[in-house]
Image (cartoon, rainbow, N blue to C red):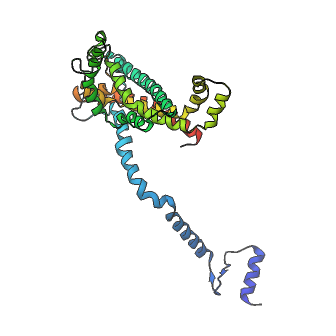
Amino acid sequence: MSNSLFRRLVSNRWGDDSDESSVRTDGGTVTESSAAGATATQSDRSWRDSEFVRSLPFWLPPALLMGLFVYGAIGWNAIISLTEWEGFGSPDYGNLDVSMYARMLSDPSFVAAARNTVVLLVVFTVVSLVVGLLIAILIDRGIRFENTLRTIYLLPMSLSFVVTAIFWAWMYNPEIGLVNVVLRGIGLDFLTTAWISNPQTKLGAVIFALMWQFSGYCMVVYLAGLRAIPTDQFEAARIDGASTVRMYWRVIIPQLRASTMSAAVVLMVFALKAFDFLYVMFGDTPGPAADILATMMFRQAFSNSNWAYGAAIATVLFGLALVVIGPYLYVQYKRGDL
């Protein structure tokens, strides 16, 4: 019996495979360590060739930039709001507290700005949705010049807040503004007023102008939702004897829930971003009747050099944005759309 055969029998007898070699197809042998090294090399190569690694150059730089300039700036703003920094020197990060937030609760200007922000948010969103839905229903019923009217209604959405503010500042002019000119022309002189100077009409004038700009967007969203509803549901409601109003109220409008939610979120976000419109129309001091959190934040930080107080107001405004967007994202996630 040869020595190699004897060693193999002993290894099989006592279960010792440490010296056993693997036979290659070319007659040679390869050790287990070499096979493990080859497997590790293949694993490393497959990891380097994975889609995740190959996609890094495309998404990693934007992610780093966004993390630094967006989320990093949000975090730094929140930290500044816990200081008493007034814009001179460096902030004192050694004594963080919530004194600025306590100051907000006792500040009548903040209470008025918060109230105006909520009113603007709710009234502007609801009115824009209702007007957009009515226009969408009229266009969906096949009125004449449908494409022309749809373009006209959507056109204000393409304008910036700056252009809209300049346009409506002229429209609301008490002497030559189109609003008062039309009221005088139809004999309603008692309704004419200084729309953006009168504290009683100032916020309403702002809401109406913003509604004029964004109701066309709601119309497009609702029109897409109406066109997606099968026509047999309209026919079934008519066969059951439902009137037009009852058909839309009980059958059609409930199916526009997704369109309403998506349009409402966009409108509320734009309402929170209405700083441009108010700043162009009133400057950074719109007065208690039309002041919102965005203009107050700008005024405290840049005009009054109360940077910590302005940062605290900005943090509250960011929290409002999360309250608006958070439920929508959660619903979309539960539906599997995210």
Q: Nearer the viewer, residue 169 or 36?
A: 169
| Snapshot quadrant of residue 271 | top left
Answer above or below: position of 163 versus 45. above
Answer above or below: position of 8 versus 82. below
Q: Position of residue 281 (x, y in %)?
A: 26, 26
Q: Nearer the viewer, residue 87 or 170?
A: 170
Q: Residue at x 33, y 28 (%)?
A: 294
Q: Is residue 227 left or right of residue 59?
A: right
Q: Nearer the viewer, residue 211 or 301?
A: 211
Q: Residue at x 50, y 65 (%)?
A: 49
The outermost residue toward the top is 190
Q: Residue at x 62, y 75 (%)?
A: 32
The outermost residue toward the bottom is 1
| Snapshot quadrant of residue 166 | top left
- The answer to whether residue 160 of the structure is visible from this angle is yes
Q: Position of residue 225 (x, y in %)?
A: 53, 36
Q: Quadrant of the N terminus?
A: bottom right
The outermost residue toward the front is 144
Answer above or below: position of 42 versus 250. below
| Snapshot quadrant of residue 132 | top left
